[in-house]
Image: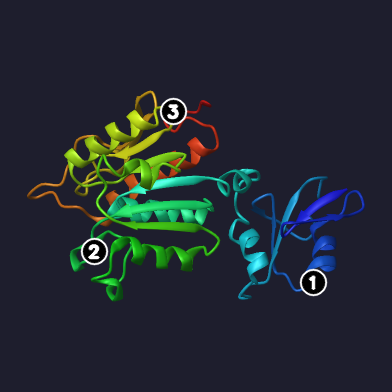
Amino acid sequence: MQINVNEQNYSFEENATVGVVRDRIKADADLLIVNGFPASEETQLNNGDRVILIRRGEVPGADELDALLTARHTPGVHEVVKGSTVGIAGVGGLGSAIAIALARTGVGHLIIADFDIVEPSNLNRQQFFIDQIGLPKVYALRDTLARVNPNVRVTACHLRLTPNNITEVLGHAQLLVEAFDQAEQKVMLIETFASRFPDRPIVTGSGMAGYGPANTVQTQQVANNLYLCGDGSTAAAPGTGLMAPRVGVAAHHQANAVLRLLLGYNPANEGKL
């Protein structure tokens, strides 16, 4: 039977166990994963199973890294997302967290666009570091993403998005993530992208300020190709600040919506597109 081991195909006798595979391919491996789930050496394998063998603490080579980064994925996911291109407009509290989640997921190409620079008040919720203060956010985030997953191609655009440059900057994206702060910017971006690319989905965020219940943050389909993540109402205001936990909940709703769209599922329900 054929078994995929660390992204290479091998032939084994029927009813081979994980231990047999380990002893033949990587005898010093001490973390054994089958089809995205930890297994014991006695686990019997079936034709077509995907096995990842890892030695804890070992830094893998470039050829092996891609397979090991996605060892815990559901089978079939990586093949789809690796060939995908996602645009993220705005890389503050939402966009920076979304980009990191998608890089860890293995999305092959991220286009990130923002005109802002990193400043101290960003650090309470945005995915930047003290030594990045003063840098353009897109360049700082590009460097961080390279440390997370060097196999992800990042196109960093340090500019203000306008109706005149949206097609040039984001035209190659299969879908768009809207992660702006200002309502008028959100409307401009969504309307412009939707008019230029009516068949491409948009994942937007609204309503994640403060420290209210996390369960009020939801993913909803609000138009044919438009999905909203947030509670839809809790905006930043005097007495209601932006804080890491709830912003992070909304960001990961958006990242999960992107993943479901790439895999052909509706982000707002259990159905397929």
Which badge, 3 or 2, is on the more N-terminal residue? 2
The residue to which callout 3 is attached is 199
123 shown above or below 208: below
Which badge, 1 or 2, is on the more N-terminal residue? 1
**Amino acid at dot 2:** Ile
| Mark 1 nearby-residue class (10 Å; few <14, some 14–19, many ≥20) | some
Q: Secondary structure at mark 2?
A: loop
Q: Position of residue 207 (x, y in %)?
A: 23, 40
- Residue furthest to the top in view is 224
Nearer the camera: disc 1 or disc 2: 2
The answer, for residue 44, to whether it is visible in the render is no
Nearer the camera: disc 1 or disc 3: 3
The residue to which callout 2 is attached is 117
| Mark 3 nearby-residue class (10 Å; few <14, some 14–19, many ≥20) | few
In contact (CB < 8 Å): disc 3 and disc 2: no
Q: Residue at x 40, y 46 (%)?
A: 87
**Amino acid at dot 1:** Ala
Image quarter for residue 173? top left
Q: Position of residue 191 (x, y in %)?
A: 28, 31
Q: How far separated are the C-alphas under marks 1 and 3? A: 49 Å
Q: Residue at x 50, y 56 (%)?
A: 104
Residue 27 badge: 1
Q: How far separated are the C-alphas under marks 1 and 2? A: 48 Å
The answer, for residue 51, to whether it is visible in the render is yes
